[in-house]
Image (cartoon, helix red, strand yellow):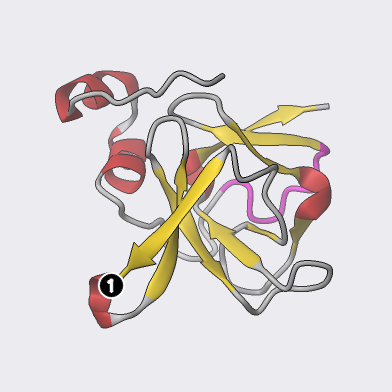
């Protein structure tokens, strides 16, 4: 899956639910402790809801206590991009899908070994493909 997928807002509105559009395209966030994947223990691959790009493996998921599904590693640098996010008067590092540029969440440097990272991801931006 190497083809970039960038659509107009109107096209995304046809493809996504209102909630998915607000979070993935308009860079919103779901309320903490509300996401369907927060407590999921199912084995599989978490993919971008917008384009199907594989993002995270279930064996890297952990309970961070943050209110969002958290992962200590992504599938790879070819699957996600990170960029500085200065919104909400805070400096954070945004995680976006490398294929379609969808907003996924943020990454922080307070995660467990071996990476020390905590990818804090909106459930709405994910689709779990079970193993």
- Residue 13 image position (x, y, % from top left): 23, 26
Q: Secondary structure at mark 1?
A: loop
* Image-quadrant location for residue 54: top right
- Residue 78 image position (x, y, % from top left): 59, 38
Within 10 Å of disc 1 (Cα), the crowding (few <14, some 14-19, many 20+) is: few
Pick the residue in front: 82 or 89.
82
Residue 11 vs 41, above or below: the answer is above
SS majority, magenta: loop
Pick the residue in front: 47 or 85.
85
Residue 104 vs 109, above or below: the answer is above
The boundaries of the magenta stretch are 36-43
Quadrant of the snapshot with the C terminus? top right
| Disc 1 target residue | 86
Residue positioned 73% across, 73% down in the render: 116
Residue positioned 48% across, 48% down in the render: 81
Quadrant of the snapshot with the N terminus? top right
Q: Is residue 62 left or right of residue 127?
A: right
């Amino acid at each position: 899956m190497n083809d970039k997928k960038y659509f107009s807002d109107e096209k995304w509105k046809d493809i996504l639910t209102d909630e998915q559009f607000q979070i993935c395209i308009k860079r919103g966030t779901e309320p903490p402790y509300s996401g369907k994947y927060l407590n999921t223990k199912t084995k599989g691959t978490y993919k971008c809801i917008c384009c199907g790009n594989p993002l995270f493996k279930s064996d890297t998921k952990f309970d961070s206590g943050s209110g969002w599904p958290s992962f200590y590693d992504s599938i790879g640098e070819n699957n996600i991009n990170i960029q500085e996010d200065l919104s909400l008067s805070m400096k954070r590092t945004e995680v976006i899908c490398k294929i379609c540029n969808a907003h996924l969440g943020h990454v922080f440097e307070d995660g467990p070994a071996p990476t020390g990272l905590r990818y804090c991801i909106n459930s709405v931006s994910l689709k779990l493909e079970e193993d």
